Amino acid sequence: MSNIYRFAPHVVHFQIPQTLIQKLVFMKLDELKLLNFLHSEFQRTNRSEVTLQADAISGKTGIHPTNLGAARSSLVAQGLLLIRKTGKIITYVCTDPSDRTPVPDGILYGGRINFDDASADVLRRYFEPQLKLCKPTENGIKGCCPFPAHDDKTPSFSVELMDGGGGRWSCFGCEKSGKLIDYEVYLSEDAAGVTISRTEAHRRVADRLRVLGVKESTKRRLDDIVYSYCDEDGVVVSETVRPGGKKEDMYRRRPHPDTPGRYIANTKGCANLLYRLPEVIEAETVIVVEGEPDVERVRGLHLIDAGSSEVAVTTIANGAGKWLPSHTARLAGKWVILIGDNDLDGKGLKHMQQVKASLDGKVTDLRHIQLPIECRDVSHYLENHSAKELIALVGEDWLDPITEV
C-alpha cells in the first residue's frame, strides 16, 4: 500500500492507518485489486489523486468493466476514496479512512501549478523552441505547426501571449486549437494516430512549467477549508469553500466539466444534495445539523445508534431555509435527529421546524433536540460538553450510551 498516508494527520511516519488494516480483512477481491492499483499510482506519482479511464484500470487490474463501478462505489462508501468525473475520465482521490478526508499531496502538500497563471514570457519560452520560422505578432507569436500529423511549410500556427491567458493557440492549417494540455496531446501523435492521454499531457505541462520557473499556485491556500458534496456514487458534484477557514468569505463552486482539477465559481445546474450523501444512504440513523463544520464536529464523535450502526451526520448547502423535498426523500424510512442553531433572530429554529414538518410521516421516527440557549450551535455546545452529555441530551434509547470521544 502507498506511503502517501504519511501526509495524513492521523498517521505516524509511513504506517498504514489501523482503520484501513481492519477494512482489508473484509474486502472483496475486486475492491482489493482496485485499491492496490490506485495506491500504486499514488505512490508512483507521489500525489494523492490520479486521473484514469475505466478501460485503463480494467486492463491493469483484470477487474471486469461491469464490476468496476461496484468496487469503486464500495471503496467510496467505506471512506477510502473520493472521486470526481470529467466525462468518461474519473479522478480518484486518496482519503484518510480515520476521518474520510482527502490526504494532502506529497508535493507541497497539495500545491498545484495553475496553468492559467503562466506569464506571457513563460508561455513564449514554452512554445518558441518548437516553432520553426517563429516570429512575433501583434498579440503573441507565429510559426510552423509543430504537430507530427501536419507537415506545415508556411507559418500557420499562432499562440496568444498574455499574462494569465493560459497559452491559447490555433492552427488555421490543420484547424486544431486549444491550450497547453491539448498542445501536448497533439504533439505526441505518432504515425498510427495514437497520442498520450490527457492525464499524461497534464503531467508533461506541469513538468515543463516547473523547469521554466513556474511555482505551485498560491491561490488555494493551505488553510482553505473545502466541503465536497457528492452524489450516491461518491462523485463530487459541488463544493463549499471557506478561504482561510472564514465563513464570511465562503463561496460555492463546481468541478470544471472539461478540465480535471479546475473549478467554476458557481453551482449552476448542480443538484442540491445532502452533505456526505453516501454515508447518509448507508446509515439507519441520521443527525441533521446546520452547516458543514457542525457536521464534521459531530462526525468526529463516531456516534453509534441503538442498532449498533454508525450514525451519519448531514446538512444542506446555502444555509437555512433551503430544505427541499428531494432531501426529505433521501431520509425516508430512517431515524432522524434534528439539532439546529440558536440564532438570535430565530432563523435556526425556524429552519429546523420547516425540516421537521417536511419529514413528519416520512421517516421511521423523528427527534428535534434544542440545545441550551447559551450555545450557538452544536459545535459550541461540544466545546464545554462531552459526547456522553450529547448522547444523554438526544436520549440513550437512540444513541449508544457507551460511546466516548
Image: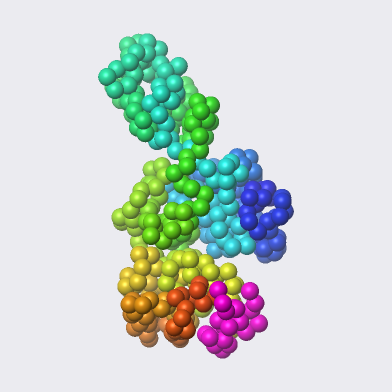
Q: Nearer the viewer, residue 237 or 118?
A: 118
The percent position of residue 249, horizontal first and vertical second, equals 38, 56
The residue sitting at 54% across, 51% down in the picture is: 93
Return the x and y of residue 126 as percentages of the image width and height: 44, 23
* Residue situated in front as seen by the camera: 192 or 142: 142
Camera sees residue 91: yes
Percent x, y for residue 159? 34, 23
Residue at point 55% right, 58% down?
101
Q: Is residue 90 left or right of residue 143?
A: right
Q: Give the range drawn in magenta.
A: 383-405
Answer whether residue 399 is magenta in the image: yes
Note whether 316 is above or below 354 in the view shown.
Answer: above
> Which residue appears at 68% of the width and 56% of the height?
11
Q: Position of residue 310 (x, y in %)?
A: 58, 74
**Quadrant hosting residue 23:** bottom right
Q: Does the magenta stretch include residue 193?
A: no
Q: In which quarter of the image is the C terminus?
A: bottom right
Q: Please say whether residue 171 is visible from this viewpoint.
A: no
Q: Judge left or right: residue 344 versus residue 56.
A: left
| Quadrant of the rendered image containing residue 258 | top left
Name the foreground residue: 153 vs 157: 157
251 to the left or right of 220: left
Q: In this view, does 395 lie above or below 343?
A: below
> Which of the two residues, 278 or 168, is positioned nearer the viewer here?
168
Q: Which residue lies furthest to the left in this view?
A: 138
